[in-house]
Image: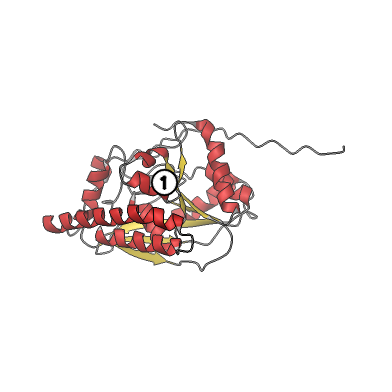
Amino acid sequence: MSAWLPTAPCTPGGCVTVAGPRTGLPLRVLRLAGCLLVLAVGLAAVPVVRALAWLPAERLVRWWSRLLLAVLGVRVRAVAVPGRRSGGSLLVSNHISWLDVLLVGAVRPGRMLAKTEVGRWPVLGPLTSWGGTLFIDRERLRSLPGTVAEIAAVLRRGGRVVVFPEGSTWCGRGGGRFRPALFEAAVRADVPVQPLVLRYRTADGRPSTAPAFVGEDGLLASVWRVVSVRGLCAEVEFLPQLPPALFPDRRRLAAAAQRVVDQLRDPYDGPGCAACGPAVERPVRWPEPPRPVGVGG
């Protein structure tokens, strides 16, 4: 359990349902086989892409992410995608599923921030590590400043970093508070924050909790639920960027990002989870950087 990040109270049994049309067993097996094939292609391609700098890495990531979502039976819908801009940006989003990473990668790839456990997952662990994922150790509070400094360095170099500041996945009926610690990287690097809203819907447009990856849910069980849904649509909506000049500290920046995300969650969403109640949060005392000392009086 995390020593400093919130823990969502959502559980697979209490929050997650597979509503709407279902796929037959042969199609589910076919989707799983296609998923394994695309993962194998990704594992084989990553070392080549990293070795050959002239390859269009970002375009390949978008193509691979869309292909993997397609073989899983997930259709991607992007809303209000901004044009390309120079300089770094911190992408922040609500967090529902392991599919979130693929959804963002399919539209606007960036270096992901993931918990260290992900790096130890079979197949996906090496794939995320080779893909440049940044890792955060949720069990060691002392590692947080170093993680923030690493993110800030990427942002200063003009990179994009994708983080999920709720700190835990939720079932989609609600969400947790955006933790301000990771917003410190955008403040230090003086780059804008790009809020995103992620949604999952059934074929008839209703919100779906089937992709949620919560509580003690197993990855294989979650994947099986996803391939069992017919017509699942994953939506990502880009909201106006938040310049750090207007929100000069991490707490106000995090609060502003959460306000705009909460306003555009699905209709049954809100600041708390109607089915599970509020998140369990543990406060963190952020070590402030030392103040500069003047020279010559």
> How busy is the neighbourhood of tag 1: few (under 14 within 10 Å), some, or many (20 plus)?
some
Measured along the vertical axis of the image, is residue 137 above or below residue 77? Answer: above
Label total for image: 1
Q: Residue 101: image x %, image y %?
A: 38, 52
Where is residue 242, by image quadrant? bottom right
Which type of secondary structure does the marked residue at label 1 adopt?
Answer: helix
Q: Residue 250: image x %, image y %?
A: 59, 45
Q: Nearer the viewer, residue 124 or 289?
A: 124
**Quick check: can you spot residue 267?**
no
Q: Nearer the viewer, residue 31 or 177?
A: 31
In the image: residue 23, left or right of residue 251:
left
Q: Residue at x 59, y 60 (%)?
A: 87
Q: Residue 224: image x %, image y %?
A: 21, 49
Q: Residue at x 35, y 65 (%)?
A: 77
State the quadrant of the N terminus. Answer: top left
Q: Residue furthest right?
A: 297
Residue that numbered label 1 is attached to = 129
**Quick check: can you spot residue 1?**
yes
In the image: residue 272, left or right of residue 14:
right
Q: Nearer the viewer, residue 156 or 226?
A: 156
Where is residue 286, by image quadrant? top right
State the quadrant of the C terminus. Answer: top right
In the image: residue 25, left or right of residue 261:
left
Q: Residue at x 39, y 65 (%)?
A: 78
Q: Amino acid at mark 1?
A: Ser
Q: Residue 281: image x %, image y %?
A: 45, 35
Q: How is the image coloured?
A: secondary structure
Q: Residue at x 58, y 63 (%)?
A: 86
